[in-house]
Image: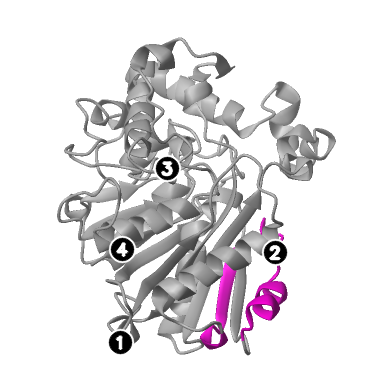
């Protein structure tokens, strides 16, 4: 069984900025070295690697530059922001089954590089499955998510105030985090409501931050975790998810377009777990766009279908609320590195070292993107 058989024992990151000078390879090596130092483990012991298919830093480059020995497991996971928790799960399986002993997962990203601005490259985006949405004006991910939220507003009476609740919660957490883009930069509800549209009904503050930076985590078996310097974050359960008739980011053609891949990932994750949503003290929910939070609250069982908007009310997502989320600021207010910073923040909550620490945070849910084939991981102390 994979349940609690492995743990994250090291986390590392670079600074986050709009434009960093080092290459993606340099950033990756910095983050991985920091994670290994945090775990008290030598580079030569690493024998498993996993990252994203969108990661342009290759395994052999990382291994060679950091002085790793033989790598006996390596993988990459597709679908952009859906990959992070799955990459953790892949390494956890390799380590738990004895294929490898010490695993590293990383994501390095330089969004400031014009070549990485894929949504500005129109011609490649009107072929294959994109041809069903791009020619009709759904050019960017935000346009597709805006369509989902418009339908959700129509069906369930949700409002922009519910999205403001999400944005304000993430910003308030970031205001406590010196690593965050939005540290000491408050956001008011009035500023949110009067911000310019990006894709109506989503405004500027409904969108994540474009960022340069890198993060990494180190995974070992549970018996070794006890010897590492910091409290371990045990990997209790994890899952990927891809629903029938799913079509990359849209899911417009399934029986229920509002129930995408996250619902499949959630069902399978809870099937494996001894824990239930009521046991989760804090959650790091993928927030490239604010609507993904109420959508995920429903998919992972924290409320019923159509109740995600109302769940955000009365400070429920903030410190002291029923389910604090994205306590580093998340993708909306800390940095957007395809959700890897949600994983490292989940580990901090389990360790008790977050800048927005939730008392007695012994169980933390981390999710990857809602709208693409995705993944999730349940961490416990």
Q: Is residue 63 magenta?
A: yes
Q: Is residue 121 left or right of residue 169?
A: right
Q: Earlier in the sequence, mark 1 or mark 3?
A: 1
Nearer the camera: disc 4 or disc 3: 3
Distance between the alpha carbons at the discs numbered 1 and 3: 31 Å
Distance between the alpha carbons at the discs numbered 4 and 2: 27 Å
Mark on residue 170?
none
> Which residue corresponds to mark 3?
330
Rendered view: 245 above or below 273? above
Rendered view: 286 above or below 208? below
Residue closest to the eye, 58 or 91:
58
| Secondary element at image label 4 | strand
| Secondary element at image label 3 | helix
Q: Position of residue 347 (x, y in %)?
A: 34, 61
Q: Which residues are the magenta region?
A: 44-68
> Which residue corresponds to mark 2?
57
Q: Earlier in the sequence, mark 2 or mark 3?
A: 2
Q: How would you rate the neighbour count of disc 3 (Cα within 10 Å): few for under 14, some for 14-19, many for 20 or more?
A: many
> Which residue corresponds to mark 1?
223
Q: Is residue 170 left or right of residue 287?
A: left
| Secondary element at image label 2 | loop
Residue at x 29% of width, y 59% of height? 270
Residue at x 49% of width, y 33% of height? 289
Q: Earlier in the sequence, mark 4 or mark 1?
A: 1
Q: Earlier in the sequence, mark 4 or mark 3?
A: 3
> Which residue corresponds to mark 4?
379
């Amino acid at each position: 069984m994979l349940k609690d058989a492995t743990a994250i024992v090291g986390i590392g990151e670079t600074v986050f900025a709009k434009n960093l000078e080092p290459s993606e390879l340099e950033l990756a090596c910095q983050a991985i070295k920091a994670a290994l130092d945090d775990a008290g483990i030598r580079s030569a012991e690493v024998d498993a690697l996993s990252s994203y298919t969108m990661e342009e830093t290759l395994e052999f480059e990382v291994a060679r530059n950091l002085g790793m020995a033989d790598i006996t497991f390596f993988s990459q996971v597709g679908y952009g922001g859906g990959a992070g928790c799955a990459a953790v799960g892949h390494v956890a399986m390799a380590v738990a089954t004895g294929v490898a002993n010490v695993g590293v997962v990383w994501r390095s990203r330089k969004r400031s590089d014009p070549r990485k601005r894929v949504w500005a490259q129109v011609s490649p985006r009107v072929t294959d499955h994109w041809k069903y949405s791009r020619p009709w004006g759904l050019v960017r991910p935000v346009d597709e998510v805006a369509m989902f939220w418009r339908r959700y507003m129509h069906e369930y009476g949700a409002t922009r105030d519910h999205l403001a609740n999400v944005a304000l919660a993430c910003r308030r957490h970031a205001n406590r985090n010196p690593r965050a883009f939005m540290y000491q930069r408050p956001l008011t509800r009035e500023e949110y409501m009067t911000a310019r549209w990006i894709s109506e009904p989503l405004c500027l503050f409904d969108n994540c931050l474009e960022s340069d930076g890198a993060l990494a985590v180190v995974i070992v078996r549970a018996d070794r975790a006890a010897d590492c310097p910091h409290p371990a974050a045990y990997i209790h359960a994890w899952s990927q998810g891809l629903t029938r008739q799913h079509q990359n980011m849209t899911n417009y053609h399934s029986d229920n377009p509002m129930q995408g891949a996250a619902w499949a990932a959630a069902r399978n994750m809870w099937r494996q777990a001894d824990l239930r949503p009521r046991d989760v003290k804090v959650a790091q929910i993928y927030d490239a766009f604010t609507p993904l939070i109420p959508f995920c609250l429903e998919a992972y069982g924290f409320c019923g279908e159509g109740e995600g908007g109302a769940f955000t009310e009365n400070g429920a997502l903030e410190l002291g609320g029923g389910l604090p989320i994205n306590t580093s600021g998340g993708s909306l207010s800390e940095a957007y590195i395809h959700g890897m910073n949600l994983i490292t923040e989940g580990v901090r909550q389990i360790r008790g070292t977050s800048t927005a620490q939730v008392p007695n945070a012994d169980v933390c849910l981390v999710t990857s993107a809602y709208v693409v084939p995705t993944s999730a991981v349940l961490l416990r102390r």
